[in-house]
Amino acid sequence: MWWINTKRILRSGFVGFWRNGVVTAASILVMTVTLFVLGSLIFMNAMLDSALGQIQSKVDINVYFTLDAPEESILALKSSIESLPETASVEYVTREQALEEFSKKHADDQLILQALEELDENPLGAHLNIRAKETSQYESIARFLDSENALSSAGTNIIDKINYFQNKIAIEKLSKVISSVDTLSFAILIIFIIISVLIVFNTIRLAIYTSKEEISVMQLVGASHRYIQGPFIIEGMMYGFAAALFAMVLFYPVTIWLGPFTEDFFGGTNIFDYYVDNFSQMFFILILSGVLLGAASSFLAIKRYLKL
Amino acid sequence: MNQHNQHDDNKHLLFVNNVRKIYMDGLPSLDGVNLKVHPKEFVSIVGHSGAGKTTLLKMILAEDFPTEGQVLFQDLDIHSLHKNDMNKYRRRIGMVFQDFRLLPHKTAFENIAFAMEAAGRTDEEIESDVPHVLDLVDLGDKIWNFPQELSGGEKQRLAIARAIVNQPDVVIADEPTGNLDPSNTHDIVQILKKINDLGTTVLLTTHNKGVVDSVQSRVVTMENGKIVRDDEHGKFII
């Protein structure tokens, strides 16, 4: 009997979905807009993350060594830095590489190149480019280096300059901006999720309100609560499913249109590429949100009318 | 008040025992109503608007709770029933309303099938019984029509078909002819009489003198929330 009832509930839900034309269309429309906004927030978050990631990747600490710093001491320091939990990567640039980079960078500046040629010795020291996992962690790496500074090769200080202390204010500001943007985008996401839940709940509540009389008749003929609720919950889930499909389809032209703009604005991240690469994940999130929202809203909305 | 005493009072189907109902306005809608309905009886409840007829039916259907008193159905206090037992109780009552209260998005077949499904009937029973009951109310050719495609009389006949399909112990009809023309009114009364002749108890509320007089059965008259007359073979007297 359980299976027969379940079959009847499913059939009744599907039939109700098709037959309640206007109510179905209105509910799907509102849910599509809501899920589109939710999806847009996911896109915005991804774009923002990518932009912040790019900014973060441009930040590093450079430790410049004295010209006579022995390579083994530099490599020993490199190993110590790599063992720090805050360190993402350490790149060692030898004096020769530093000169080569410098020459490449100033290839068009004949004056500088001539000045270099006139020098007998390479004037550039080796250096380490250090990247932290988070922008906020540069300070602790710099503090470590400051203390390591005391360590030297045969009593001579091998570190010439650490550029963190010159860029400290800029890095700290950037850390604060990144942290604020993260918090703000999370807060906006939560606020929009709450608004979306309320909109969907009210839409479905209105849809079920139109069936108020029907629900009371169903109770008066002795139908169980499960038998009355079931088809409405199925309908709510179908609204959510259809709305998620429409929202995903709608994102296709919108992301194509916005692609070049986001590529310029967010430093190379194309929203259409993100849509294509993360299609299945986005689709799953929207379908799940739509179906769960539809089911929960229907369940709560109909409870109110099941008091006979 | 003329009391009817021809039935054995111990064999009542329904017993409304000293029921009072007071709503928010403080005035009693029902004021100490006592009514016994016996199996196979046809009882017409008459009275002006506001006399308490619909409130009384609401108490019998457990749509609302009495402020005082009890409604017993075969000695069961219906207002103390749990959810599942309440559903079972309601399946033993067939309800017909003035405004039909059909399920608008279901066909004639589906409206009746819904009541059978709610009662746990099998698909085979539904397939065989629904056409049969629609034939009984002369709607055999409207089986796939939606309620909005039916006339007022047809809608009410469909509502009656839904009410009787589970072979209830009692059919309660609340002003079933209120929205119908004389011809359809006559048809509906004949169907209700036929249902009663086949052994089902019928409880009817009406304003319509012609309906009461043509049924020629017990008439309970209500006024200001009280039963003021109870005549075994009564006529409409207000």
Image: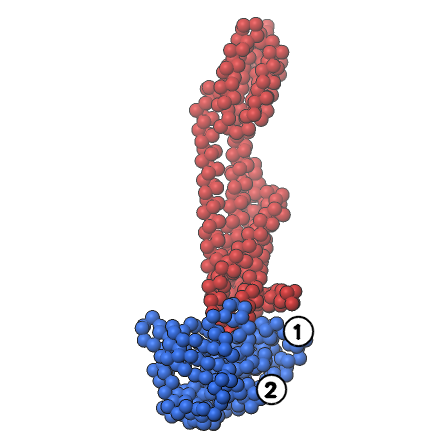
Chain colours: A red, B blue
Q: In the image, what residue type sits under mark 2?
A: Leu
Q: Is residue B117 left or right of residue A308?
A: right
Residue at 63% x, 47% y is A280
Q: Dividing the picture into quarters, in which one does residue A235 lie? A: bottom right
Q: Dividing the picture into quarters, in which one does residue B44 lie? A: bottom left
Same chain for mark 1 and mark 2? The answer is yes
| Chain letter, disc 2 residue | B
Residue at 55% x, 25% y is A86
| Chain letter, disc 1 residue | B
Residue at 48% x, 33% y is A178
Q: Which residue is mark 1?
A: B123
Residue A74: x %, y % from top left: 59, 13
Residue B63: x %, y % from top left: 45, 73
Q: Which residue is mark 2?
A: B136
Residue A91: x %, y % from top left: 60, 21
Residue A61: x %, y % from top left: 52, 21
Q: Is residue B236 left or right of residue B73?
A: left
Residue at 56% x, 65% y is A226
Q: What kind of element bears circle 2? A: helix
Q: Is residue A217 placed above or below A87 in the rendered structure?
A: below
